[in-house]
C-alpha cells in the first residue's frame, strides 16, 4: 500500500514538472524606424518633381510617410511626394 502511494506521488510530481510553462511571452513588440532617406531632384518654377522616402529597416512597424512643405506660397507637395514649385525660391 505504501509503495502505491509513493509511486502515485512520484508520478504526480513528474506530471507537474513536465507541464508547459504558461508564462511564455507571445506578445510581438514594435519595430522602430532607424533611418529615413529622402531623395528628389531640384525643381524650378512651374516644374514638378517626385520626392521619395526610403524607410529602414524594411520590417519597421509603421513605415508611413507624411509630406509637408515649410511654405505653401513657394511650393506644394502631394500625399505621394509630388512637389510643384510656385515661385523661384529655395525651399528647405
Image (tube, grey):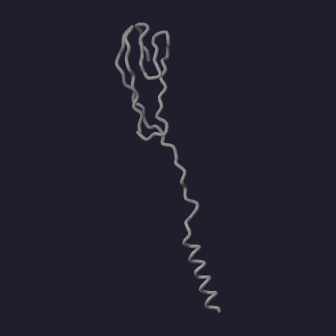
Looking at the rendering, in which quadrant would you find the N terminus? bottom right
Residue 33's place in the image compared with 16, above or below, is above
Number of labels in the image equals 0
Looking at the rendering, in which quadrant would you find the C terminus? top left
Left or right of 50: which side holds 64?
right
Q: Where is residue 51, by image quadrant? A: top left
Residue 84's place in the image compared with 34, above or below, is above
Q: Residue furthest left?
A: 41
Q: Nearer the viewer, residue 75 or 35?
A: 75
Q: How far across and down, in percent of the image, does residue 9 sit?
A: 62, 82
Q: Nearer the viewer, residue 19 or 83?
A: 19
Rendered residue at 43%/41% (across/down): 59
Rendered residue at 44%/8% (across/down): 86
Q: Where is residue 11, by image quadrant? A: bottom right
Q: How far across and down, in percent of the image, does residue 20 sit?
A: 55, 66
Rendered residue at 57%/75% (across/down): 15
Residue 68's place in the image compared with 20, above or below, is above
Q: How far across and down, in percent of the image, does residue 38 sit?
A: 40, 26
Q: How far across and down, in percent of the image, does residue 24 sit?
A: 55, 59
Rendered residue at 43%/7% (across/down): 87
Amino acid at each position: 500500500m505504501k509503495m502505491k502511494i509513493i509511486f502515485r506521488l512520484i508520478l504526480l510530481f513528474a506530471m507537474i514538472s513536465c507541464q508547459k510553462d504558461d508564462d511564455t511571452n507571445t506578445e510581438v513588440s514594435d519595430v522602430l524606424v532607424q533611418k529615413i532617406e529622402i531623395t528628389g531632384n531640384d525643381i524650378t518654377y512651374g516644374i514638378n518633381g517626385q520626392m521619395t522616402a526610403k524607410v529602414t529597416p524594411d520590417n519597421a512597424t509603421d513605415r508611413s510617410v507624411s509630406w509637408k512643405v515649410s511654405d505653401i506660397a513657394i511650393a506644394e507637395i502631394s500625399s505621394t511626394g509630388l512637389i510643384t514649385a510656385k515661385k523661384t525660391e529655395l525651399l528647405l
